[in-house]
Image: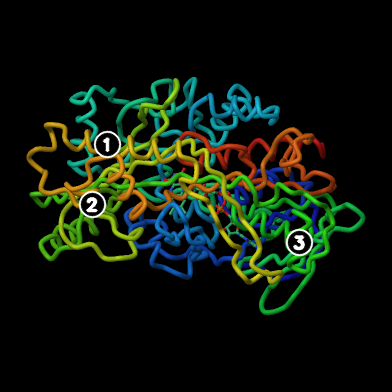
Amino acid sequence: MQKLSQTQFDFIIIGAGSAGATLAARLTENSQFSVCLIEAGGEDKNPFIHIPFGLAFLTRMTNLGWEYDTEPQSQLNDRKLFWPRGKVLGGSSSLNAMCYIRGVPEDYDRWSDMGAKGWDWKTVLPYFKKSEKQQHGESEMHGADGYLSVSDLRHTNPLSSVFVDAAEEIGLAKVTDFNSSEREGLGFYQVTQENGQRCSTAKGYLRPALARPNLTVFTKALVEKIQIEDGVATGVKLQLDGQSIELTASKEVLLSAGAINSPQVLMLSGVGPKEHLTENSIECIVDLPGVGQNLQDHLDAIVQHRCKNHDSYSISLALIPRYVKAAFNYMFKRQDLFTSNVAEAGGFDRTQTAGDIPDIQYHFLPAILLNHGRTTAFGYGYGVHVCGLYPKSRGEIKLRSNKPNDPAMIDPHYLEHADDQKVMIDGVRRARNILAAPSFEKYKSWEIGPGPDAQSDEEILAFIRKKSETIYHPVGTCKMGDISDVMTVVDSELKVKDIKGLRVVDASVMPTLVGGNTNAPTIMIAERCADLIKQEYK
Ligand SMILES: Cc1cc2nc3c(=O)[nH]c(=O)nc-3n(C[C@H](O)[C@H](O)[C@H](O)COP(=O)(O)OP(=O)(O)OC[C@H]3O[C@@H](n4cnc5c(N)ncnc54)[C@H](O)[C@@H]3O)c2cc1C
């Protein structure tokens, strides 16, 4: 994006995703700081990023993502799962489904109990509010002056309303705001959109900051490693325009490459489990066994039905006039179905084994989804996605080699804990129960999945093993917490243990998954960290 005219900065940020773009915008508010933001992907010029409905096609665009696949999953019939992650300004916030969810207070109080002091709900709520530009204005739970626009959907499909209305028919609450005190039940999601367009962190945070003279942004620049000298992070080595160059940081290097790439970059820099680094011929500078461990993700299964009428979104000749009209309405008014994020409605529910808080989340899609949208699905239909929110299985990220261009090995170990299987089985039953509500009668044709033959626990589990996929929320691979815990990677100020001038700031520091989508929590982490840094270098 910018030419190389300067090689020394106060702060170097690796990765311009949800966290990195947020950090860059907040740190450059202080005109005394010079900040360099380095992004492996390109600029976010593709219009499908910005038109919300375009998300249905983003996973097909191989130039916008890392195109990761997991290792074969033994509990999922040895399938390798596709894991899309953004490789573009805005990172995964440029590709995501825009659902704005924070999780529940208990998520953050648990982090604090686990040793992440200062990350309890009372302390983090002001940072959620600080980030937010809420359409309905400021309130006890919402902020209105932030960079992240949070809005109601401008268009919703009639089937999404049927889903929300089904709540009362099956004994669940109808929720109007999942980010207030009433969280359990079904409702419409609010979305990270402004004026009917996606509000990624590139759009919301970075764009207003780009004019600042103290911000330099390099795109298509892959950081190979962090330079560490005598226990201090002094800069980075990167590939830019086919050349290998070095940049120095006089204050700090901030690693925001996401839950897969942050541990990879740390390990390539000599920070990680000693034995594994040695296996890959990397000199171990700091032996941190927790790097890459503690991987957690939300596994997702879909209960899908064919629809009797033409109300759902679909690829069909009959809908061409409708899409033409929608295109005009989008172009001239930013209204109509192209403003939809498709996952318009959803909710939170408790399975048999849940405690006091919901342990499953629903995303309702008024469309048939195949292979993350990478396979064209013809015909009309709808489905409830259900994911287990608090998996007990733990996976890992490992190096495939010591070459920065080789993708890391991703092994989430899905469903290896028997309790995770129970949650998913009951979750599928509950999702089925929603679609059996009387309101769906006039739409319901046959069940595509799990299918009428899957009734017993064993049969439902067999379906989950065969069909479940990620719902894109990997976290935990550079765990934050008490430094006396040998598996923590960063302390409560996100500083990497035993190294000066290096922090990890992204979804990888979450000690445990939150009970919901992970974009807003990641942005909150970056907001709070920016404040910690500003206070330290006052
Ligand atoms: C398809 C999809 C749908 C989702 N839907 C939702 C949703 O609806 N709501 C929600 O809240 N969350 C959603 N999420 C999750 C959410 O977007 C992520 O949790 C969040 O964006 C993670 O932020 P991050 O900063 O940790 O990583 P990212 O946003 O992925 O940023 C990491 C950045 O670092 C860059 N990078 C990596 N390695 C290097 C390197 N070596 N050198 C330079 N740059 C590098 C990457 O290219 C990327 O831009 C979704 C995610 C996906 C992929």
The foreground one among 271 and 537 is: 271
**Which of the labelled discs sits on residue 367, or is there none?**
2
Outermost residue, right direction?
230
Q: Kindly report the distance in space between the C-alpha atoms of the residues bearing marks 1 and 3.
A: 44 Å
Q: Residue at x 56, y 66 (%)?
A: 41
Locate residue 24 relative to residue 236 in the image: left or right: left
Looking at the image, residue 528 lies above or below residue 224: above
Q: Kindly report the distance in space between the C-alpha atoms of the residues bearing marks 2 and 1.
A: 20 Å
Q: Quarter holding the C terminus?
A: top right
- Residue labelled 1 has its Cβ within 8 Å of some atom of ligand 1: no
How far across and how far down the image is residue 438, in percent?
Answer: 11, 31
The foreground one among 459 and 482 is: 459
- Residue labelled 3 has its Cβ within 8 Å of some atom of ligand 1: no
**Which of the labelled discs sits on residue 429, or is there none?**
1
Q: Quadrant of residue 194?
A: top left
How far across and how far down the image is residue 507, in percent?
Answer: 59, 45
User: Mark 1 or 3 closer to N-term?
Assistant: 3
Q: Which residue is under mark 3?
A: 277
